[in-house]
Image (cartoon, rainbow, N blue to C red):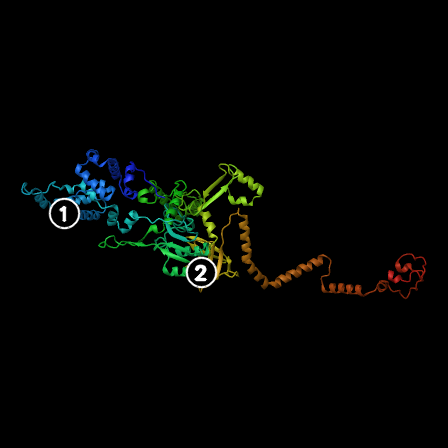
Amino acid sequence: MLALLPTTTAAPQHSAAALALCSSEQLAGLKGHQRERVNAWAAEVVEMEKLPVRRRGAFKVGMAQRLGVSKSTLAERLKRWEESRDPQAFLDNRKGKSGLTTTFTDFFKQLCGEQGRVSAQAIRVLHDMWRDGHHIPGFGTWQEYWIKTYGNTLALPQRCGDFLPDGLSAHNLYKHLPNKFALTAMRQGRAAAIAQFGPLVLGTRLGLYVGAYISMDDLWHDCEINVRGVNKEGQRPLEVSALDIFSAHKFRWQAWPMLENDDGTRTTIRGRYTRMLIAAILHVDGYSRRGTTFVVENAGVAIPKPLEELITHVTGGLVRVHRGSIGGKPAISGHYHGQSKGNPRHKPHQESSHHPHHNRMTDKILNPGLIGSNSRLNAPEEHYGRDRANTHLIKTVQRHLAAGTMTPAEAAKVQLPILGWHEWYQLATRAYHQLAMESEHALEGWEEAELMHSEFRLGPGQDWQPMSALDEMPPNRRAAVEAYITLPGMHNVRRKSRLEVYREGARDLVRVDMSAAWLILDQDAQPCTVTNRRLLEYTENKRKFHFIGPIRTASGQSIDLRRGATYRLVVNAFYPSKALVGDTDGRLLGVVDEWERKTRMDLDGLAHSYGRVAAATGDELADLERRHWDQADLKRRQEEHNARLFAGKPVTAEDRAREAEKRRIAKSVTPSEMIEALTPAPTPEEDEPEDDDFSSLIGGPAPAAVDDEDHADFDSLL
């Protein structure tokens, strides 16, 4: 949409007479002051044409006076009008001759371009050249110009003094300065001129989709932070990120403090950060089946040709790379070549996304280490003193630690005047989350792309619900709700947030498997040995990561980590929760999970970690059980022996044999045989008892006589 600048004086409209005499195309080409003149002439011509021919002569006399022209000029312009019927015939299009020749103006403009800062210096140089007797194109020397002007009427002076032609006055020369584009091109170069004064290529997100274009860039944050125990002074965080152009959502980002290495150098953007970002996008986030373009630079976050070929291979040609142009070509062939540099307008969406995040990070209370976008021009005044105080405190703590007069725990309690790394990272993460969830934005093409969200609520202060919730209501309730939400303030149409648009489109993205990620990152793999606790430990930028087994292969199998074994490990800084593992020969084995720290309040997380510990040690315990099965068997038999002993059951072999014999006899003996076996045999000295002395057999009085016929089956009763 074009923004119309307010003007102090509105251009005059065309009169009815002018519209009657001229076409709209003719009138559209007139300037404001020309319109006034054409309107006046058209009004007179219309009145004149109403009169009969015999009366027009007298009318033309007054017409010339009213228009302020002579009779001859009036006749000439009316003749031109009759011949051309063009409103330009009413105008005085004569141009006065310029007092300066083209040769001089070219010379003067070149002189302006040679002055690196202001054109006023070019005018001073020109005047000095004139007074010193140099030849000036179009004028010659001052002596020649004096003779040409005064001839023999005035003697030629010894010195020029203040003799200066009218055309060389500063007031007149300012009218002939080069335009801003030419001045910038001559002073700063071609790229600067195009960037500041070249026409912009206007674009729109209409017709795009999530994953169509992904822009990548690096970013220095406008603040300094501390990394306790590591840095000697405040450090600026450096970010590498990827932005989906359609949704304007920065879906993948990571930042690092630029720490000093042991050799005194500082860590900067390296190629492996770009490889990590590419692997994270392809393996975790995904690319579109309709095609994805990576928009990158030629330096910094750059994709070299071998990596581009690998990306094409693993995605089947669905992902291509688009690089920005490299500036540095001189504006004039006689100038030397400038330093090669990228074009920031190649990725305007990414560059503009930095601005709102910077705005959310400029709270001097929450982020006291602000240094401004250009510390030389707009740094906070107190930054100088704050930075010196911060450096002094860090060095003081380091001296106390070296002398042993302060413990590390006491050093951690020292309050520094700028944020620590973890505090700043949490602040940056929150700012990015707020930006992603924001719906009150003015991103281009949102309405045209129908990225709007309709919602309703059931009362003031109630939560907003999507209109799709009406589809889940019973018909009667839906009718009542639809009638209610027509009230003012109960329905709303808002713009979708960046995150909402990205998540809706991300469902259709496809991802490469871990083998493709390994091909991209295998050159960054580091040897890592399993510790005695069966963990893989890895250090990146002074931060230590721990990973726990088992290794999960692409086919779903598990490989246990062996204590003391060495593997090749790749930890992607853009998703450090998992790491790729290969053997020492460079072959991919699978992926392991990060062994994260859990807070005591996270009961579910603690339970999960305990389960992982049990799973990680279960195989070794099972192996121990297998090797020492005899000890376990002996323990089991001892416990069984003691239990039987205390229960009064047989425990020795003789006891068990006796019990077995009893069980065998009990199963094989008949009732009569059992009675006979239980009855003691009579001794020789004793007389055989009488039949009626039955009590001696059963230990009681003899029963009364009974009929044998009634009890013939006495044995069966027993």
- Residue 283 drawn at (x, y percent): 45, 56
Q: Residue under circle 1?
A: 138
Mark toward the start of the polypeptide (2 vs 1): 1
Report if residue 102 is visible in the image: yes
Report if residue 92 is visible in the image: no
Comparing 450 with 294, the one in front is 450
- Residue 305 drawn at (x, y percent): 36, 60
- Residue 231 drawn at (x, y percent): 38, 49
Q: Residue under circle 2?
A: 516
Residue kind at label 2, given as amino acid type: Ala
Identify the secondary structure beneath mark 2. Answer: helix
Q: Is residue 504 left or right of residue 344?
A: right
Q: Residues within 10 Å of mark 2 (few under 14, many from 20)?
A: some
Comparing 463 with 682, the one in front is 463
Residue kind at label 1, given as amino acid type: Gly
Q: Is residue 10 left or right of residue 574?
A: left
